[in-house]
Image (cartoon, grey):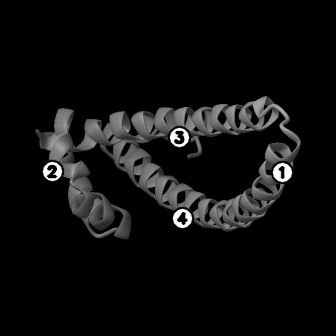
Amino acid sequence: MKLPQKDAAPLSEVEAFEQTCCEFTRLLYEYSQEEYRLHQAEVKVYQNRIAEMETRCREYESRLFEGGAYRGELEKKFAKQDRKRQRCASRKERIRKFFFQIAQSVFRLGRRLSGQWGIKDRLKGTTLFKRLYLKGTIDRLRG
């Protein structure tokens, strides 16, 4: 969103609010699409890695049990992967909460103004809104 120049006429509050909401919706949609594509790519990579790790672990465990060795090395490796998974999940949760708070300003806190100015109608036409509505997120925002 470009801010008005000093010599240019300032935007009215209605136009600024509408422009902000539209920009937010566009950015949120682009971000969610990009995140979805990246997530799908990561899932494929991790599925391949998990399959490789499972075969390696089976081979390694069979060798360990044959020799009577200690299994602590495998447990450390899996604990490290689990911590990495938890960090990624907490980051996604923070991003989700942030967007939830912003969307709440349109559908709950400022619903009267956004309805009068037609912002809700614009947002309802987006595929992101439809996806959030089907998940029940919009109902939680309203309630």
Horizontal side of 120 relative to 50 (left or right) equals left
Q: Using the rendered view, name the quadrant where residue 102 is placed.
A: top left
Question: Element at badge 4?
Answer: helix
Q: Circle 1: is it few (<14), some (14-19), or many (20+) Cα within 10 Å?
A: some
Q: In this figure, which residue is indicated by the disc labeled 1?
A: 60
Q: Which mark is residue 92?
A: 3
Question: Element at badge 1?
Answer: helix
Q: Amino acid at mark 3?
A: Lys
Q: Amino acid at mark 4?
A: Gln
Whether the residues at callouts 4 and 2 have beta carbons within 8 Å, the answer is no
Q: In this figure, which residue is indicated by the disc labeled 2?
A: 115
4 and 114: which one is in front? Answer: 114
**Residue at the spot 48% in from the left edge and 53% down from the top edge:** 28
Q: Which mark is residue 38?
A: none
Q: Using the rendered view, name the quadrant where residue 76 is placed.
A: top right
Relative height, residue 119 to residue 64 (above, below): below
Marked residue nearer the N-terminal end (2 or 1): 1
User: Between marks 4 and 2, how big is the CA–CA gap?
Assistant: 26 Å
| Image quadrant in which the C terminus is located | top left
Question: Element at badge 3?
Answer: helix
Report if residue 12 is visible in the image.
no
Which of label 4 and label 1 is nearer to you?
1
Q: Amino acid at mark 2?
A: Gly
44 and 131: which one is in front? Answer: 44
